[in-house]
Image: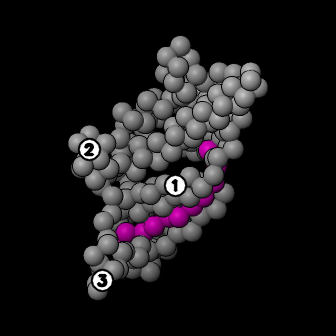
Amino acid sequence: MRDDMARLRAAADRQEIEQQIRRYCRAIDRLDVELLRSLYHPDGVDLHGSFEGNAHEFADFIMVRLKRLTTYGFHTITQSIIDVDGDAAAAESTYVAYHRIAPGWEPVSTFFGEGYAAAARAAGTLDREHENSCGGRYLDRFERRADGVWRIKRRRITNEWNRNGVTTHLYAEGELANYNLPGARDRSDPVYEILLNGR
């Protein structure tokens, strides 16, 4: 009986942790800084490419960066392997992400590098949006502390492949156009109606 209860508790813990990992995607795509901060302990650390430091400071940093450089983003978790050990856990989650980069030298060269931006200028596409599709892993240490909530103590992101080019927008003709509803990058997104108003 005790073994059964331990397995149920571990399964519930893994489910709670996976929900937190998935909430990260919502926070990033909706540019919801409060939600993003809530996923990390105040002393949490994020090692995130161009940023390495306190995770709450990362939340502020990444929101400014995304608003300045990108016009749209979409992140999804494809799988997670979560090992729970009492009030600590290790998680390896694979992700796929899409970023649409604003036109112009500053956003394109900052995101992709000056060589890419120079090539875009030479090709006559610098004044168009560009896109980046990529994938990798979130490598997380979680802790459950006195409030009973699993939060990230330490995250390292890996980026293991990417494809880049001029943006191909949603096709907006015919029956297909009736289904197009890109997400909003704030609380005007339809998901908040469901969460806040029950509609």
Give the SS element for disc 2.
Answer: loop
Residue sitting farthest toward the bottom? 174
**Residue 137 screen position, x and y as percent:** 64, 49
State the residue at coordinates (39%, 35%): 35
Question: Mark 2 or 3 closer to N-term?
Answer: 3
Give amino acid for label 1: Thr
Give the SS element for disc 3.
Answer: helix
Question: Mark 3 or 1 closer to N-term?
Answer: 1
Q: Quadrant of residue 62?
A: top left
Q: Is residue 131 magenta?
A: yes
State the residue at coordinates (58%, 45%): 49
To which residue does mark 2 refer? 198
Tag 2–tag 3 contact (CB < 8 Å): no
> Image check: 165 left or right of 81?
left
To which residue does mark 3 refer? 175
To which residue does mark 1 refer? 76
Give the SS element for disc 1.
Answer: strand
Question: Mark 1 or 2 closer to N-term?
Answer: 1
Q: CA distance from mark 1 to mark 2?
A: 24 Å
